[in-house]
Image: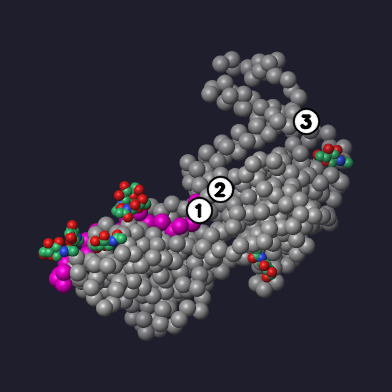
Amino acid sequence: MNGDPFCYKSSVSFHFDERLMGSIQILVFCLLCFASSTYGYDPLDPNGNITIKWDVMHDDQNTQVVRVSIFNFQLFRHVEQPGWKLTWNWTGDEVIWDMTGAETTEQGNCSAFKSKQLPHCCDRQPVIVDLLPGAPFNKQVANCCKGGVLSSMTQNPSKYGASFQMTIGSFNASVNGTTGEALTGFPQNFSIGLPGYTCGEPLQVPPSKFIEDRGRRRTQALDTWNITCSYSQFRATPTPTCCVSLSAFYNDTIIPCPKCSCACQGQPTAKCINPGELPPVLQLHHNEEPQPVVRCTPHMCPIRIHWHVMLSYKQYWRVKLTITNLNFVKNYTDWNLVVLHPNLKKVTRVFSFNYKPINQYGALNDTGIFYGIEYYNDMLLQSGKTGNVQTELLLEKDTGWKFSFGEGWAFPRKISFNGEECVIPQPDYYPTLPNSGPFTAIALPLSLIVLIAFLVLYRMT
Ligand SMILES: *[C@@H]1O[C@H](CO)[C@@H](O)[C@H](O)[C@H]1NC(C)=O
Ligand SMILES: *[C@@H]1O[C@H](CO)[C@@H](O)[C@H](O)[C@H]1NC(C)=O
Ligand SMILES: *[C@@H]1O[C@H](CO)[C@@H](O)[C@H](O)[C@H]1NC(C)=O
Ligand SMILES: *[C@@H]1O[C@H](CO)[C@@H](O)[C@H](O)[C@H]1NC(C)=O
Ligand SMILES: *[C@@H]1O[C@H](CO)[C@@H](O)[C@H](O)[C@H]1NC(C)=O
Ligand SMILES: *[C@@H]1O[C@H](CO)[C@@H](O)[C@H](O)[C@H]1NC(C)=O
Ligand SMILES: *[C@@H]1O[C@H](CO)[C@@H](O)[C@H](O)[C@H]1NC(C)=O
Ligand SMILES: *[C@@H]1O[C@H](CO)[C@@H](O)[C@H](O)[C@H]1NC(C)=O
Ligand SMILES: *[C@@H]1O[C@H](CO)[C@@H](O)[C@H](O)[C@H]1NC(C)=O
Ligand SMILES: *[C@@H]1O[C@H](CO)[C@@H](O)[C@H](O)[C@H]1NC(C)=O
């Protein structure tokens, strides 16, 4: 290949038509997808995972009492309704005699049991769901019954875990009436039934300890196993689910969400509602999340985030942040927004949202999570007049830098809604300061680099 990048210049017309830009965006997007699917983790939450803990509490040869706990160790991704659905494969001949704090969705074939009391579940692959809040008292166990919903660690530290307890036994032993047949092998192929998550191999870890008698005595499990499940946005939804639009007081142009951010209008799978058309009547199914039905827009996203640079004072500047729900079939409960912007380390005030910094890289302190205030705006209502929430934030201009609104500095570097990264307009399109010559001079080479990268890759395939 010729080393001089400008040799391509003659072969390509430099007219940036929409289609070319679109294919570049798709290419860049696919590369990002590929990168995130291979790394399988989120740089904003590198240790985030859901851990299943399996504590053997009691073992008398014929039966075992096991306490299973699920912890959402993620900074900002939560588990929404319809909630987790835990499954595994038994490796031996186990049956579940009894369960509290959760239930299996099927009892399975227990016809071999002639006893009066049948097991709770005889399936080789039990599917376990959480009980709903307010379950009968005798079905409850400590820290149970949340309808499968788990908060993120940041938003509600008291609601990020759930537990249930079960008694398991050996099928052969109970059918044949023999005793002394130990349960063999640990179950395999765990799954928590949530899009985007895959669970690893069970790992035996030091036994869990439990506190008794107000902390004066500690007991411990006989055996403890951990199963770690990790998330990948690409596995969950190959297309984005939110986008960002931008504006600033110094320029009248509103930069909309990039076209086709989430889907393109007119694609056979992309249905949308035009103004005047009636939104669909919602068929409520308890066990599945409805497919989004969005308002018709060029970006076709169910969620739009608007970042408006509102005012500049001598020492401070002010941003208005609006989240709009364009989905007619979903209320987003306990929504959250993660923003990456270098000035977030100098946040002075956040109005009508909760805010917490997420300090992944210590000193940088450029990332934070915004979420609603309980009973006030923690639910983002379905599309319509009330389908938005907004905040204003006051940021102190850091005297350490030469603060400037130029070159798009005032706009966010990265935004995710409910843990899913949103599509942000290309820097080339940011609102510019009046008479800012140098900015366009920077923007063009950037497009050039993207184009050259595209061509090089194109040649290589
Ligand atoms: C899961 O998350 C917890 C809490 O952040 C962390 O301590 C643990 O190391 C993580 N596990 C894995 C396998 O990454
Ligand atoms: C196992 O999981 C528990 C919580 O689920 C966690 O506290 C513990 O650190 C984990 N152990 C290992 C070795 O990952
Ligand atoms: C676990 O899943 C793998 C692949 O799906 C399968 O080959 C294996 O038999 C399963 N293990 C058990 C115990 O069913
Ligand atoms: C149920 O299990 C018994 C033996 O455990 C077997 O004979 C019978 O065929 C099974 N029934 C079904 C419908 O699978
Ligand atoms: C074990 O799990 C896999 C999926 O993980 C499933 O396809 C398979 O049928 C299961 N095997 C048994 C014996 O249940
Ligand atoms: C019961 O025990 C007999 C002999 O000990 C054995 O042949 C048979 O397979 C066992 N039945 C079951 C269901 O395990
Ligand atoms: C249970 O009995 C069946 C035969 O009925 C046998 O194939 C199986 O290995 C036995 N399982 C255990 C754990 O003993
Ligand atoms: C959203 O919440 C409102 C008010 O609580 C309710 O009227 C509406 O039916 C809900 N919509 C959905 C899709 O759950
Ligand atoms: C990060 O910023 C927040 C304010 O946004 C501040 O309260 C916190 O002390 C900062 N942390 C560090 C490590 O600088
Ligand atoms: C506002 O920004 C747009 C997009 O960058 C630019 O084309 C336009 O010239 C700017 N308007 C003014 C008045 O500077």
Nearer the observer, 234 or 131: 131
Given the image, on which type of amino acid does mark 3 rest? Ala
Nearer the observer, 46 or 179: 179
Residue 245, placed above or below residue 202? above
Identity of the residue furthest to the bottom in this view: 213
x, y percent for residue 444: 74, 29
x, y percent for residue 313: 84, 56
Q: Secondary structure at mark 3?
A: helix
* For discs 2 and 3, the disc positioned in front in the rendered view: 2
* For discs 1 and 3, the disc positioned in front in the rendered view: 1
Q: Identify residue for label 1.
A: 195
Q: Identify residue for label 3.
A: 441
Find residue 279 and name its label: none
Q: Residues within 10 Å of mark 2 (few under 14, many from 20)?
A: few
Residue at 36% over, 73% down: 99
Instruction: Please report whichever mark, 2 or 3, sits nearer to the chain's N-terminal start.
Output: 2
Query: Can residue 174 be seen from the camera position used here?
Result: yes
Magenta residue span: 176-196
Q: Identify residue for label 2.
A: 237
Determine if the magenta segment contains residue 183.
yes
Instruction: Please report whichever mark, 1 or 2, sits nearer to the chain's N-terminal start.
Output: 1
Residue at 57% over, 21% down: 459
Q: Are marks 1 and 2 in contact (CB under 8 Å)?
A: yes
Instruction: Please report whichever mark, 1 or 3, sits nearer to the chain's N-terminal start.
Output: 1
Say if disc 2 is inside 8 Å of ligand 8: no
